[in-house]
Image: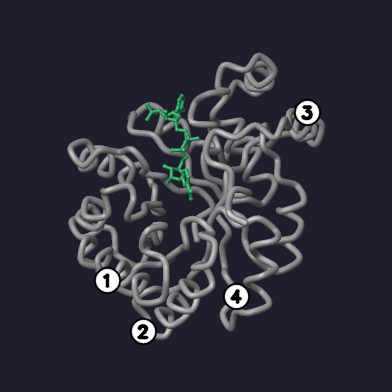
Amino acid sequence: MPVLGLGVYQIRPNQAKQVFQWAIDMGYRLFDTASLYGNEKEVGQAILKSTVTRSEFFITSKLWNTDQGYNNALSAFENSMDQFGLDYIDLYLIHWPVTNLRLESWTALESLVETERVKAVGVSNYMINHLEELLQKCSVIPVINQVEFHPWLYKKALLKYCEENRIQLQAYSPLTKGQKLGDKKLKKIGDKYGKSPSQILIRWCLQHNVPTIPKSANKQHLEQNINVFDFHLTQKDMMKLDLMNQDYSVTWDPRDYP
Ligand SMILES: NC(=O)c1ccc[n+]([C@@H]2O[C@H](COP(=O)([O-])OP(=O)(O)OC[C@H]3O[C@@H](n4cnc5c(N)ncnc54)[C@H](OP(=O)(O)O)[C@@H]3O)[C@@H](O)[C@H]2O)c1
């Protein structure tokens, strides 16, 4: 899986064609979508029309909350595949750990791996308690846990737990949906390297060995966000960023799912 991809939440179908074309031309190969986002069709079309071979792309989608449960999950996956128009996708995730249904949904995802229409399965928004429950019951271990992760929500214990259990953490909303891009301390670190706040935040994820999927529909931003492999944050600057943690979240709280 590429360590950096494009998150496509809120990329509207009418802008998707142009945005995905820019992204592919710039070298983006991972596209992170979900049935909720309403643009699986446009992702599939971009892949099918591209001159880049299918095997170079990495496509992720997710099972939405109202589709959880064994049978519902299987039919939701079929609906997603109809939207994509692709033979397979690379990764399918349980979007949120919906209470009382998540284990049944996981059994459905395990059975999908056998069909080879999805290469791997994982979860999203799982906290340690959700993972403990799953690891006790599952026969296939989730390869990925995709969670909100940035310096203001540095989930250190979860990262450690995932590393110990060979589950790869993946960061969503790495740019805090734009909310903290004007932070003065962040800007100061960026100025030192001649890099933008978004580039610093992406590097922070990567240097914690956490792959990430920043979203942008803007050509300059797309370019900035993928050009993060020519510099390295010092240990001291990584620590400065680590210390910015405030348990500040830009989305729903997974702890709401007991
Ligand atoms: N599993 C889940 O529950 C879950 C939840 C949330 C998100 N996600 C995934 O994670 C992806 C990313 O998270 P996100 O969309 O919440 O937010 P994000 O990537 O943290 O931030 C996106 C925002 O930052 C702006 N931006 C991007 N690059 C920028 C740059 N270089 N300079 C200035 N502003 C920039 C974007 O505006 P422009 O478009 O104008 O550039 C947009 O407003 C989503 O698209 C989705 O695929 C998953």
Q: For marks 3 and 4, give the CA distance.
A: 34 Å
Note whether residue 41 is visible.
yes
Mark 4 lies on residue: 141
Q: Which residue is mark 1?
A: 78
Amino acid, disc 4 = Ile
Q: Quadrant of ligand 1?
A: top left
Q: Label 1: state its secondary structure.
A: helix
CA–CA distance between discs 1 and 3?
45 Å
Residue 237's x, y, as percent?
76, 29
The residues bearing labels 3 and 2 have C-alpha atoms spaced at a distance of 46 Å
Q: What's the residue type where badge 2 is placed?
A: Thr
Q: CA distance from mark 1 to mark 4?
A: 22 Å
Do the residues bearing badges 4 and 2 touch, measured as CB atoms within 8 Å?
no
Q: Position of residue 173 (x, y in %)?
A: 52, 39
Dot 3 and dot 4 residues touching (CB under 8 Å):
no
Q: Which residue bears the numbered disc 2? A: 115
